Image (spheres, grey):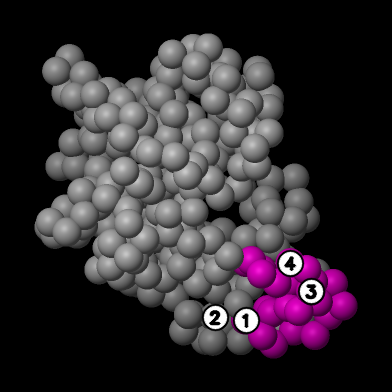
Amino acid sequence: MKCDLHCHSHYSFDSTQPVEDLIRRAKEAGISVLAITDHNLISGSLEALKQNEVEIIPGIEIDCFCKDTIIHLTAYGMDLTDPRFTEWKEYYISELDRIGVLRLKLIEEKYNCKLNVDKIKSYTHFGYPYTNVEIEKVLFEDCNHPDLLPYQIGDKSQNPIANFYWDHLAIGKWGYVEMVLPNYIDIINWIHEIKGVIICAHPKVTIGKDMDTIQTLIDAGIDGFEVYCSYHDEEYANFYKEIVQKYGLLMTCGSDYHGATKPNIELGQTGYNEDCTQIVTMLKEKIKEKHNQ
């Protein structure tokens, strides 16, 4: 069995592929179990559940703070009728709108340029406000600056939007604009309340090997870690595999596929090339356990 438990449809503000395309790609890649974990909304999961070509585990990826770090938590199998999903989606979009304007100003000042706002807005979809994704696209297309060359034609051009974000817009960087996000404990408790399982996604990117943060998440009731993903090398996969084995937690695998926004990542590129039956079975058993509580 092959699975991908972390991917994004075009319902995510920073992804490009329709749900029907994800299903087609999954079938072509031999993926039999898929979880569409769109950013802070469940629209992709709801649409995917209407088809019967690939098994779907309902999912979502939620942004929240843990200490001073933004982490991403993927949740699975929860009650999708909970009205707080709609409330959270609306709030998150309002935050994207607020920080987009501030981030555009910072980027224009940094590179001494004036970007075409109408062109930036033309790259948005589903009524989303413009974000760093659309700003970066226009920046790379229209701005001539030596510091941008690595992302335009250089060694970071294979995944320019994500690379630029982590290099310049993440926490602690010059282009960071603080989002008002919930606390990790509130998210873990909410997902458990609505019978879901919650996993720390791509931990290498957000918390590395910080054992204090890892222990904090375990103490708060996290159900597992995404051990295998497109960002994890063998060292990190082994590190988090030891963590889940030591604490009796779940192990998941996901590509974090975003379509053209992250062109170097393919659906199913999870870094785990063995039979996924045990991973999927244990996740389903944990979901069933939550629903029986």
Residue 217 place in picture, x, y as percent: 51, 21
Residue 222 placement: quadrant = top left
Q: Mark 4, residues whose alpha carbon is within 10 Å: few (<14), some, or many (≥20)?
A: some
Is mark 1 in CB contact (under 8 Å) with mark 2?
yes
The numbered mark at residue 233 is: none
Which is nearer the N-term, disc 4 or disc 1?
1
The numbered mark at residue 120 is: 2
Residue tagged 1: 138
Which is nearer the N-term, disc 1 or disc 2?
2
Which is nearer the N-term, disc 3 or disc 1?
1
Give the residue at the far right of this rendering.
146
The residue segment tinted magenta is: 138-161
Residue tagged 4: 156
Image quarter of the N terminus: top left
Residue 155 in the magenta stretch? The answer is yes
Foreground mark, 3 or 2?
3
Residue 116 placement: quadrant = bottom right
197, above or below 128, in the image: above
